[in-house]
């Protein structure tokens, strides 16, 4: 029996699927001696492993990008457009498969995982308009016989570093935008959820992307440092925590690269007493607890203005109705957190609220999910009587926890939002247009919803962010994304008629 158990253990370790690297058009097994386990957050079982790519493997990946750039950057824009037209169809055809991988590795519910793919797919669809998006500008006759025009051209090898919470959407904010502009791309997905990025790469290859136009490496700090330091990489797109994002912004910029860095959040939902109560409470609960609060746009903070503070008991009742379960179980509303460490961190932030005098009106810390006792579950939690100095307010919790503050007036609510260090997203719930206008004009936040709880912009606009939520000056996707992934060349040309030949050298500055 002992031998039998030993055999099973060894077999299960060997049989874990290993995540491949994607180098020069091939899915290859890493030779790395260092591997990380991938867990199913609903059970904590090991479901696979991912390598920390070796230095040689990372060099091979970036060299492949550099070689491919010579031909890809010269490929006609129509040919690139055709590849992305095929790609969007392949993503649609495989949306269920992609969603299953997301639920397995990340934990979110299957319906929400499909939403994750769908919001990324919209960016791919948008890249298919590249023939309009990349147009330059012209101004004829700026002086006699002289015209000026600009081209938008790719910049070279670009790199993306992505977080665990949107395994499809965030990689799809990056490499399709970069590649359709004529750049080649090196992606380092989150080491906790690499599976979806690998399937996205396979589909891109099936759509006809030439070898080397997309390469994928895996790892943690060494891979990030490699990207920040390698001279062939011209631009880095990062989405994730402040700790990593500020570091990457500084190290990458110091090395002369363009860096766009989307980071953490503490998003306020301001509830005016004139709001449509039914809608507002449902929207607040959905946006606070959907994806177990692991969205950078989760409404994690409610600010109840004036009489709206009386809505708290109903808010709690609605949150109680959500079903906590493994993401692949029918009817699940709230899945597990990504790791036991994340669960422990969220629980301790809830406790910090208690210790500092807040009131836990709904406590999800001891939630039990039948059949998934080892999962990283925390149930919906609502903490009231929170003040802006408490740790549960100053820190991003990134879990299914709604902290509730009160304000006497809209002005007080605006002051509170602007005093918070983050500026990612916010929403106001009101039926008063003047209040909505005042709010949207006066808050210093990137994404603002008016009766829209999670205002993630569609790809014809850009995903922005201000203050502590963003470093850089050019945002993700939309026109700003095209700007980030291109450089401008300005041509001034003169075609004079023969009789207008210069009679002597012109030594003064042309005016
Ligand atoms: P994370 O910062 O831990 O990881 C993101 C990436 O950075 C990963 O690829 C990881 O390998 C790497 N990394 C992690 N720590 C690092 C370090 N110290 N130095 C260098 N690289 C490091 O983030 P996460 O936990 O995967 O994602 C959650 C965070 O992402 C939250 O703070 C959330 O608000 C934020 N987020 C922001 C947006 C946005 O658009 N603003 C969107 C999604 C997520």
Image: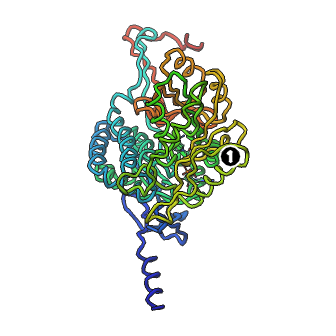
- Looking at the picture, how far across and down is residue 319, in whole percent? 49, 43
Residue 402 left/right relative to 169: right
Residue 321 left/right relative to 83: right
Residue 176 left/right relative to 259: left
Question: Would you identify the image quadrant in which residue 119 lies?
Answer: top left
Report whether residue 400 is seen.
Answer: yes
Q: Secondary structure at mark 1?
A: helix
**Considering only vertical position in the picture, is 35 above or below 12?**
above
Coloration mode: rainbow
**Residue closest to the eye, 400 or 45:** 400
Mark 1 C-beta closer than 8 Å to ligand 1: no
**Residue closest to the eye, 404 or 388:** 404
**Residue closest to the eye, 355 or 498:** 355
Report whether residue 22 is seen.
Answer: no
**Considering only vertical position in the picture, is 270 above or below 214?**
above
- Looking at the picture, how far across and down is residue 382, in whole percent? 58, 43
Mark 1: give few (<14), some (14-19) or many (20+) Cα within 10 Å. Answer: many
- Looking at the picture, how far across and down is residue 34, in whole percent? 55, 69
**Considering only vertical position in the picture, is 58 above or below 152?**
below
Question: Pointer 1: what residue?
Answer: 353
- Which residue is at 37% across, 51% downward? 331
Quadrant in which the N terminus appears: bottom left
Q: How many marks?
A: 1
- Which residue is at 41% across, 69% downward? 17
Quadrant in which the C terminus appears: top right
Residue 161 left/right relative to 120: right
**Considering only vertical position in the picture, is 421 above or below 328?**
above
**Residue closest to the eye, 75 or 399:** 399
- Looking at the picture, how far across and down is residue 402, in whole percent? 57, 42
């Amino acid at each position: 029996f002992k031998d039998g158990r030993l055999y099973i253990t060894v077999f299960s370790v060997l049989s874990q699927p290993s995540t491949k690297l994607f180098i020069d058009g091939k899915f290859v097994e890493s030779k790395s001696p260092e591997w990380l386990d991938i867990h199913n957050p609903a059970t904590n079982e090991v479901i696979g492993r991912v390598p920390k790519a070796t230095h040689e493997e990372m060099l091979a990946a970036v060299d492949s990008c550099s070689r491919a750039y010579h031909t890809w950057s010269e490929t006609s824009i129509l040919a690139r457009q055709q590849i992305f037209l095929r790609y969007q169809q392949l993503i649609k055809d495989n949306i269920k498969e992609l969603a299953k991988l997301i639920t397995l590795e990340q934990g979110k519910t299957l319906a929400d995982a499909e939403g994750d793919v769908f919001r990324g797919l919209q960016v791919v669809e948008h890249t298919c308009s590249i023939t309009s998006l990349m147009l330059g500008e012209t101004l004829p006759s700026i002086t006699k016989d002289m015209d000026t025009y600009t081209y938008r051209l790719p910049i070279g090898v670009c790199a993306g570093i992505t977080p665990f919470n949107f395994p499809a959407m965030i990689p799809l904010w990056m490499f399709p935008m970069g590649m359709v502009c004529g750049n080649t791309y090196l992606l380092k997905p989150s080491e906790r959820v690499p599976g979806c990025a690998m399937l996205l790469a396979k589909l891109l290859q099936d759509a006809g992307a030439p070898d080397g136009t997309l390469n994928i490496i895996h790892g943690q700090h060494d891979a990030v440092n490699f990207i920040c330091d390698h001279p062939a990489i011209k631009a880095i797109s990062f989405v994730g925590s402040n700790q990593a994002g500020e570091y990457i912004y500084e190290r990458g910029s110091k090395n002369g690269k363009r860096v766009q860095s989307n980071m953490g959040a503490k998003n306020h939902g301001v509830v005016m007493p004139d709001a449509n109560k039914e809608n507002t409470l449902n929207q607040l609960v959905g946006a606070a607890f959907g994806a177990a609060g692991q969205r950078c746009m989760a409404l994690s903070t409610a600010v109840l203005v004036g009489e709206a503070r009386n809505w708290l008991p109903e808010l709690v009742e609605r949150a109680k109705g959500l079903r906590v379960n493994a993401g692949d179980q029918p009817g699940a509303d709230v899945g597990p957190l990504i790791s036991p460490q994340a669960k422990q961190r969220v629980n301790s932030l809830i406790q910090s609220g208690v210790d500092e005098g807040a009131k836990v009106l709904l406590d999800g810390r001891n939630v039990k999910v039948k059949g998934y006792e080892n999962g990283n579950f925390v149930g919906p939690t609502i903490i009231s009587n929170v003040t802006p100095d408490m740790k549960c307010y100053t820190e991003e919790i990134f879990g299914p926890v709604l902290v509730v503050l009160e304000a006497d007036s809209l002005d007080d609510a605006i002051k509170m939002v602007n005093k918070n260090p983050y500026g990612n997203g916010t929403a106001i719930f009101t039926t008063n247009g003047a209040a909505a206008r005042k709010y949207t004009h006066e808050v210093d936040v990137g994404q603002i919803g008016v009766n829209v709880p999670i205002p993630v912009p569609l790809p014809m606009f850009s995903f922005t962010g201000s203050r502590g939520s963003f470093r850089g000056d050019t945002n993700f996707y939309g026109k700003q994304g095209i700007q980030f992934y291109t450089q401008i060349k300005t041509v001034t040309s003169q075609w004079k008629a023969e009789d207008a030949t210069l009679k002597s050298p012109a030594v003064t500055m042309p005016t």
